[in-house]
């Protein structure tokens, strides 16, 4: 290591000191291509996120293409209302990684290396999880930034096939200079319909193997509000990261314990889609310098409205025809206004008004928890359809009134309450989580 590299490494905060300097974040928004952009990060922070990652940027393109940077980055990224922030890159060349990272110094708290992307484009581009066989290159990528970049470097990766190999891999990444590690409790092959359940026992094993001084975030199985706390408890991680769970319900990091006394628990945990859509659109308008924030609105609205659109097909058609790049704001205001008016119309019916704040829990599942049936005009998780079936629970439509009145702790109808939201959090119970979640 050169004297210059020694000087750079010496003045940077490292490990737990770095973690504490950014507020010891517990709830973390994952890096998501075309989804964790500025406007969404602002919304997520309002709903409880402590730390956000940018979408994954391609290091070579970011470093060499002004057009790519203009489309994906702006002066407002990493501003005072967008911190703490970690910028993530995919890379397979240490110098390109460093060149790109230097362009965001001053607008972030750290730079992250993506070692977890399992998609075909990552295979073709030789980055993400498809670097995991090339430990020498991974070490060079991380150590290059650790020694020469003015801000710390971190890494996000997936578990390998065995506990021992996973720990050896994690230790190599830490030794190379990664100050935080985020570990996804799934292997590279677990994606799409094969996503399956994150291995929390493996994450707990890695937590113990790396030692308590190493800052570690856990990723996987965060589906309902409150699950992030269960993930942290089950793995002893410093924080919990959410990807899809955050996209379908930005209140994913909330829990019964944090609910204000003057707010109904259902409103706190599962906000209405009309209110979230309006708040999100207003945020996008407030950051016109962020081109990508407007370009990805349509995708975000489809996710927020996912339970709502199958029941309101005319609004689904309106959204489907929209174009974020070409439509002016009047189109988007009209769409959100249509959602607001429709929800108001729905709630004008007494039976829907009575249903609005109810959250029904299904029967006890073999993994130790319960699926929930939530009013379709509220934000809620998405479960992938596998072999023609979608995991989850829907309260029977025709339930005798006598059954409702005689509901017991083991009955199907269980309105949400602080007691019902809390569930056992042992690794064995929480590790066997909902199939095909992808969170």
Image (spheres, rainbow, N blue to C red):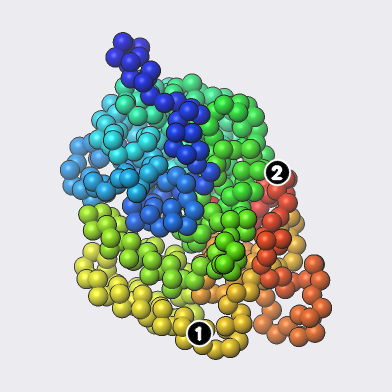
Of residues 23 and 125, which is closer to you in this image?
23
Tell me which residue sits at (34%, 76%) in the image. Answer: 335
User: Quadrant of residue 5 in the image?
Assistant: top left
Where, by quadrant of the figure, is residue 257 drawn? bottom right
Q: Position of residue 350 (x, y in %)?
A: 58, 88
SS type, badge 2: helix
- Classify the position of the N terminus by image quarter: top left
Q: Is residue 400 above or below residue 225?
A: below
The kind of secondary structure element at disc 1 is: helix
Residue at image mark 2: 427
> Left or right: 156 with respect to 99?
right
Instruction: Name the residue at 33% across, 61% down.
Output: 283
Regarding residue 32, the answer to whether it shows in the image is: yes
The residue carrying mark 1 is: 346
| Mark-to-mark CA distance, 1 and 2 | 41 Å
Q: Earlier in the sequence, mark 1 or mark 2?
A: 1
Residue drawn 57% across and 61% down? 260
Around disc 1, counting alpha carbons within 10 Å, would you say few (fewer than 14), some (14 to 19), or many (20 or more)?
some
Percent position of residue 230, x then y: 64, 48
């Amino acid at each position: 290591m050169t004297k210059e590299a020694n000087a750079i490494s010496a003045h940077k905060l490292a490990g737990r000191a770095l973690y504490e300097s950014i507020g010891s974040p517990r709830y973390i928004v994952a890096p998501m291509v075309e989804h964790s952009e500025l406007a969404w990060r602002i919304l997520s922070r309002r709903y409880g996120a402590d730390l956000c990652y940018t979408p994954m940027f391609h290091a070579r393109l970011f470093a060499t293409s002004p057009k790519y940077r203009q489309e994906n980055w702006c002066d407002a990224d990493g501003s005072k209302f967008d911190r703490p922030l970690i910028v993530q890159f995919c890379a397979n060349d240490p110098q390109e990684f460093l060149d790109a990272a230097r362009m965001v110094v001053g607008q972030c708290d750290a730079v992250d290396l993506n070692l977890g992307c399992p998609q075909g484009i990552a295979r073709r581009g030789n980055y993400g999880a498809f670097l995991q066989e090339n430990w020498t290159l991974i070490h060079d990528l991380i150590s290059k930034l650790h020694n020469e970049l003015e801000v710390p470097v971190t890494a996000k990766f997936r578990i390998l096939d065995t506990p021992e190999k996973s720990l050896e891999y994690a230790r190599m990444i830490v030794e190379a200079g990664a100050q935080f590690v985020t570990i996804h409790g799934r292997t590279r092959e677990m994606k799409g319909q094969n996503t399956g359940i994150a291995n929390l026992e493996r994450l707990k094993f890695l937590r113990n193997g790396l030692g308590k001084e190493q800052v570690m975030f856990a990723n996987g199985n965060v589906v309902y509000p409150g699950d992030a706390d269960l993930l942290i408890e089950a793995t002893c991680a410093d924080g919990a990261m959410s990807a899809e769970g955050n996209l379908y319900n930005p209140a994913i990091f909330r829990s019964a314990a944090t609910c204000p006394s003057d707010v109904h628990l259902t409103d706190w945990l599962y906000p209405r889609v009309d209110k979230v859509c309006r708040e999100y659109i207003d945020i996008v308008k407030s950051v016109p310098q962020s081109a990508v924030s407007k370009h990805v609105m349509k995708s975000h609205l489809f996710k927020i409205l996912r339970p709502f659109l199958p029941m309101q097909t005319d609004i689904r058609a309106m959204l489907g025809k929209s174009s974020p790049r070409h439509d002016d704001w009047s189109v988007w205001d009209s769409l959100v206004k249509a959602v607001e008016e429709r929800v108001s119309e729905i709630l004008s019916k007494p039976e829907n008004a009575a249903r609005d704040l109810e959250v029904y829990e299904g029967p006890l599942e073999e993994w130790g928890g319960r699926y929930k049936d939530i009013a379709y005009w509220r934000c809620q998780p998405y479960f992938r359809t596998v072999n023609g079936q979608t995991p989850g629970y829907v309260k029977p439509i025709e339930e005798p009134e006598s059954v409702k009145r005689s509901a017991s702790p083991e009955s199907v109808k269980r309105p949400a309450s602080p007691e019902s939201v809390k569930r056992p959090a042992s690794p064995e119970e929480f590790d066997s989580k909902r199939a095909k979640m992808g969170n």
